[in-house]
Amino acid sequence: MKKFVDREVELRFLENQFSQNGSAFVVIYGRRRVGKTALIKEFIKDKKAIYFLATEEVESQNINNFKTLVAKFFNNSLLDKVQNITWEEIFGFIANNIKNEKVVIVIDEFQYLCKVNSFFALILQKIWNERLKEKNVFLILCGSLVNMMEQQVLNYSSPLYGRRTGQIKLKPLKFKYLKEFFPQSTEDELIWLYAILGGVPKYLEVFNYRDDIFESIRENVLNKQSFLYEEPLFLLEREIQDIGTYFSLIKIISLGNHKLHQIAQNLSVPQTRLTKYISTLIDLDILRRETPVTEEYPEKSKKGLYFINDNFLSFWFKFVYPYKEDLELDNVEFVLENIKRRIVTEHISYVYEDICREYVSELSYRNELPLKVNKIGKWWDKDNEIDIVGIDQTSGSILYGECKYTNAKVDIDLFYSLKQKASKVNVRNKTKEYYVIFSKSGFTERFLDFADEMKNLILINFPK
């Protein structure tokens, strides 16, 4: 059964928009499968609403479908029989029949209407200005093709620019919400599930976990009939044209090439040719660019590294895509053994760092740290790397952290190593320094005794 999880902030924002006097116009967008439609349906479940799902059919078919919904909503059989009606006439009917109670009008997959009619955004601008703006209506436009939504609705050049009263770019769920999908799982199992699936609700819903993670991977990812087997292919095909180039680029990054010159070298192309592809993938939330958290102007930094911004895509490009030929020949056992051999060191341990940073942010939010972390990330130079650097921009305090997802208990030498690397971090107006160390397998007795005497050191055994 599908569950509605989290999204309290987004629902609160929508309710606030709804409660205000007069009209409202909100845009909801984000990558596919992230839960936009579920959010909308949760919001409108107790409201008078017309929910219209646009399709890639011809415009006349979309108009007729919308007309039928409106006729049903207002219980008007005459409208349903009208032929050759226009968008303007249907929305005019809505405007003339709205009474005191606010009506929500949802156009889901809005981008399809713009694909079949490149002037639709202009048509809707006129409708909003002349028909809906002064009415008691809440218009929601929702779309998955991120590039098109930004071009047709959010960009300065769009006819609809400046009309909206708010927008939501929906992101995947955080690690802390996975328990809602897998209530019987241990914390360590949840780490693995998050590393494999990320926070995309659809992936969490379809993954049938049966206590054995590798058998579940076999059934839900490596099985040619499974939903997830070719999901990245379907996901990218809807968004981009030259899919071969994009796949090659993502694969190169998944193999550990995060610097621009490394990516270009592996693809045998000049760096300048990658700009368009990388920008598109960042816009689609498939890639992200990271800089050391201490960089004052990250957008200008030459230390930028590129990472896959989705755990499932990262997993798939590391462990599935390079072995598609084997899977098509039913050599599933070979692929599964390869995953077993590599997954902890090449995938789980890196996702564990992301989860630990989220953990620190949660602790700070609950005031359970000696500083208020309002900026967090990684730090590196040419010789060193620190998993967690959290900065209290008000007090100048700074938190340094390491994350160890290993089967051995962590000893005191890791603290001294972290402290030595921390001495190389340059932060303006730095005051107090704190240290945090996460360990999957706990800590040695002497390290625990040492930490008891240190007022600026926090040891966290996670998962417990």
Image: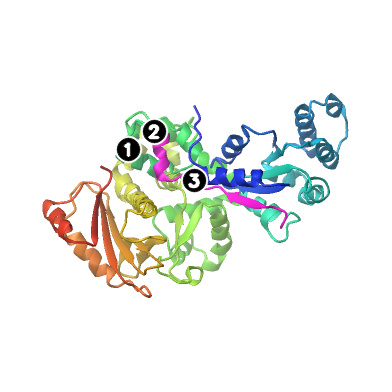
Q: Point out the tag, 3 or 1, that comes first from the N-terminus.
A: 3
Task: In the rendered view, tell whether residue 162 sits above or below residue 202.
Answer: below
Residue 168 picture location, percent across and down: 59, 49
Q: Point out the tag, 1 or 2, that comes first from the N-terminus.
A: 2
Please indicate whether residue 48 sits to the left or right of residue 83 in the image.
left
Amino acid carrying label 3: it is: Pro
Residue span colored magenta: 161-181
Please indicate whether residue 355 sits to the left or right of residue 146 in the image.
left
The answer to whether residue 241 shows anywhere in this view is no
Q: Secondary structure at mark 3?
A: loop
C-alpha distance separating marks 3 and 1: 19 Å
Q: Are marks 1 and 2 in contact (CB under 8 Å)?
A: yes
Q: Which residue is mark 2?
A: 182
Residue situated in front as seen by the camera: 5 or 102: 102
Q: Are marks 3 and 1 in contact (CB under 8 Å)?
A: no
Amino acid carrying label 2: it is: Phe
* Residue pictured at 63% horizontal, 35% vertical: 44
Residue situated in front as seen by the camera: 416 or 95: 95
Q: Point out the tag, 2 or 3, that comes first from the N-terminus.
A: 3
Q: Which residue is mark 1?
A: 189
Q: Secondary structure at mark 1?
A: helix
The answer to whether residue 102 shows anywhere in this view is yes
Q: Quadrant of the C terminus?
A: top left
Amino acid carrying label 1: it is: Glu
Judging from the image, the colouring scheme is: rainbow
The residue lying furthest to the left in this view is 446
C-alpha distance separating marks 2 and 3: 16 Å
